[in-house]
Image (spheres, rainbow, N blue to C red):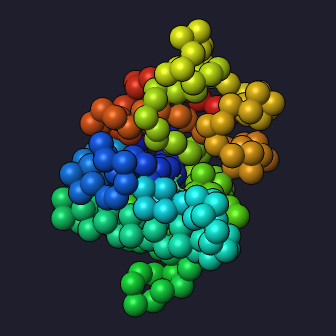
Amino acid sequence: MSSAPYRRVIVKLSGEALAGAEPHGIDLDTIDRFAADLIAAQALGVTLGVVVGGGNLLRGATAAAHGADRTIADVMGMLATVMNALALESAIERLGGRARTVSAIAMPQVCETYERRAARRHLDDGRIVLFAAGTGNPFFTTDTTAVLRAAEMGAQAVLKATNVDGVYSADPKRDPAAVRYDRLGLDEAIEKRLGVMDLTAFSLARDHRIPIIVFSIREPGAIESVLRGAGRATIVGG
Ligand code: UDP
């Protein structure tokens, strides 16, 4: 029986988090730590999907600002998420867990192509499903992908891992008067343009009543703590 309030969640890991202390690239020690955290979280009886970002390798908007065609740049960004997902898949399996990367862009020699029912079956069978290549479309983000996959997979929440312990009224590094929220409505997050997620992700979450739980991934075991309702986090919506 599950000891956590959620039966199924989608964890959003940003590319930045996968770089560890480095500004870019994939930090394999950090990947190992996240893999161990995911396996520990799953042991609570929760089925886990993970949407991985790609900002540690390439962001479409940045490449477009340097003159690249935006749609091509976004495809490059989506391919970056596949590398991250494969690194995480390999770490989870090495540590004794079971994982499956599914990509929204078909690349059958590399991994399975995303198909909703097959992905749900993997989750039901206890695999950690790594959703790669975002939505498969340019002009979207992996935050939007996380909410989309949560809706498709029947997840009760999106756990958005960040470098801070929740949502603040302003950037706490720049504004000492910034206030941290424990709970926040999705309408309020949208109106205040709090910048935790893009508006497409927020409005999809609002339409489908999917709460977004924002927490810091810095401490080992952070995902498990949030699932137990023990860690510091801001619950947006729900
Ligand atoms: N991307 C995209 N469509 C999607 C998801 C992602 O085109 O559905 C591209 C986009 O260029 C984005 C990059 O992939 O900049 C990496 O994703 P994101 O910026 O969301 O990663 P994160 O900030 O979480 O590391």
Residue nearest the observer in this picture, 114 or 47 = 114
Q: Is residue 78 above or below residue 4?
A: below
Count every numbered label the image shows and give the total: 0
Q: Residue furthest front?
A: 66
Residue nearest the observer in this picture, 203 or 192 = 192
Place of residue 46 in the rendered image (x, y in percent of width and height, measured from the top left)? 42, 48
Query: Residue 154's quadrant in the figure?
Result: bottom right
Q: Residue furthest bottom?
A: 109
- Residue 117 appears in the picture as rendered: no
Residue nearest the observer in this picture, 22 or 115 = 22
Q: Is residue 129 left or right of residue 134?
A: left
- Residue 95 appears in the picture as rendered: yes
Q: Is residue 24 above or below residue 183?
A: below
Q: Is residue 37 left or right of residue 51?
A: left
Residue at the image position 69 percent from the left and 46 percent from the top? 198
Place of residue 221 in the rendered image (x, y in percent of width and height, measured from the top left)? 29, 36
